[in-house]
């Protein structure tokens, strides 16, 4: 996060993400809004990154938040919307890696090991080193049922596989409930028919501490960085006021979406609409011509600077305009059409020109 002092000595920070501003808006301006509240945003955020990867420190985020509901249906809607959004922009082979914000942390706490050992276990889980994981747990006298659960969870690749994992003992009640919530989520994903795109990752947690339930990252092959991420945060909004509202959401980085589309060979379609500049000494006729062209789907603009026709044509070349049309005192009179790309001109009726562009004569 970028932090600095203003001239009064107050500590200021540039926004590093949009969830906090959204939470503030909900608590201050939407206290009487019916729930659930569905919001979206597109805005720039700022993050300080020290990395060998070329990562921008200012980038544009587009995201959604679903506030006021903590059901599996709400989580499923967010994940389905994320997948459909990525498909809509043209991405292929979309993948969602999903974990739980506190499942791993809570299980590590029951093992009663120190911070260094916890970090070591998380590192082994992240690189899927099951041999090293077994060895470390044996060295630290993990309870046998907890050891088996860690191995099973580290081997699970889908939410369906979690149904076979269960821990006996009251101290594991919280972990069992978390596993049940993920199983319920799987059923919702089945209804949306997106279950094949969601993969379970036991090691996936978030550095941001406000997440309380599912957490996830979206990616496509060969990019190397997640396109976006999100999760459930049920205790965060109340920090900004008296509203105790559960919430879930995600944010996508627009720049990374463009990188991913480029990597997959996607070309942004060029604007095929015709561009025309209308010039005339008779403003009322020129305005009428512009309006008629726009109604026909043509990108038309009025020459407003009163410069010469020659300079208007030069301007049209720079702006990659297709035609400059010079009209007389009436649209019934012939007009002069300058074809910028062909560097030619001709006199035709305005109706003929409009018909040639595909509009109605």
Image (tube, helix red, strand yellow):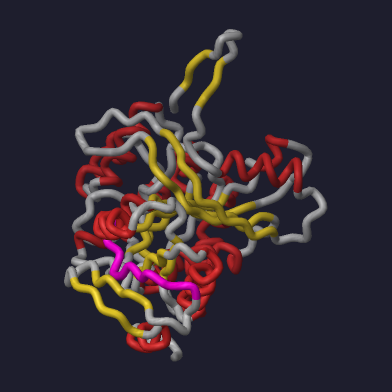
The single residue placed furthest to the right in the displayed view is: 32
Relative image position of residue 28 (x, y in whole percent): 75, 41
Q: Note whether 353 is above or below 183 in the view shown.
A: below
Q: In the rendered structure, which segment of residues is drawn in magenta?
A: 319-329
Q: Quadrant of residue 275?
A: bottom left
Q: Is residue 324 magenta?
A: yes
Give the vertical position of 79 relative to 146 (above or below).
Answer: below
Kindly identify the residue that appears in the image at 70 percent across and 36 percent down: 240
Q: Main secondary structure of the magenta part?
A: loop
Name the one closer to the observer, 70 or 248: 248
Report the side of 290 relative to 95 (left or right).
right
The residue nearer to you, when weighing 119 against 300, is 300
Residue 283 image position (x, y, % from top left): 52, 64
Q: Is residue 224 in sight in this rendering? A: yes
Please give the name of the residue rendered at 62% of the width and 52% of the height, measured from the top-left corner.
247
Residue 243, magenta (yes or no):
no
């Amino acid at each position: 996060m970028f932090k600095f002092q203003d001239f009064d000595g107050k500590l200021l920070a540039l926004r590093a993400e949009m969830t906090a501003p959204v939470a503030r808006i909900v608590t201050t301006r939407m206290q009487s809004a019916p729930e659930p509240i569905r919001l979206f945003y597109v805005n720039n955020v700022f993050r300080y990154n020290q990395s060998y990867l070329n990562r921008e420190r200012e980038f544009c985020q587009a995201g959604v938040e679903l506030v006021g509901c903590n059901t599996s249906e709400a989580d499923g809607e967010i994940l389905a919307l994320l997948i459909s959004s990525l498909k809509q922009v043209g991405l292929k082979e979309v993948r969602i890696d999903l974990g739980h914000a506190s499942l791993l942390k809570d299980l590590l706490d029951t093992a009663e090991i120190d911070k260094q050992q916890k970090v070591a276990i998380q590192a082994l889980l992240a690189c899927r080193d099951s041999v090293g994981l077994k060895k470390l747990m044996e060295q630290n006298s993990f309870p046998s049922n907890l050891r088996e659960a860690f191995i099973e969870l580290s081997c699970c690749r889908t939410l369906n596989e979690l149904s076979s994992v269960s821990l006996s003992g009251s101290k594991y009640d919280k972990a069992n409930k978390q596993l049940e919530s993920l199983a319920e989520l799987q059923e919702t994903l089945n209804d949306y028919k997106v279950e094949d795109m969601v993969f379970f990752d036991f090691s996936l947690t978030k550095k941001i501490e406000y997440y309380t339930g599912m957490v996830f990252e979206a990616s496509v092959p060969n990019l190397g960085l997640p396109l976006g991420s999100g999760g459930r945060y049920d205790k965060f909004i109340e920090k900004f006021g008296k509203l105790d509202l559960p919430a879930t959401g995600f944010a996508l980085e627009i720049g990374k979406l463009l990188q991913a589309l480029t990597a997959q060979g996607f070309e942004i379609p060029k604007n095929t609409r015709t561009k025309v500049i209308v010039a005339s000494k008779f403003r009322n006729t020129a305005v009428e011509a512009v309006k008629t062209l726009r109604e026909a789907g043509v990108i038309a603009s009025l020459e407003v600077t009163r410069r010469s026709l020659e300079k208007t044509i030069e301007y049209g070349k720079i702006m990659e305009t297709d035609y400059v049309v010079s009209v007389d005192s009436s649209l019934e009179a012939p007009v002069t059409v300058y074809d910028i790309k062909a560097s030619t001109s001709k006199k035709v009726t305005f109706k003929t020109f409009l018909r040639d562009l595909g509009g109605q004569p």
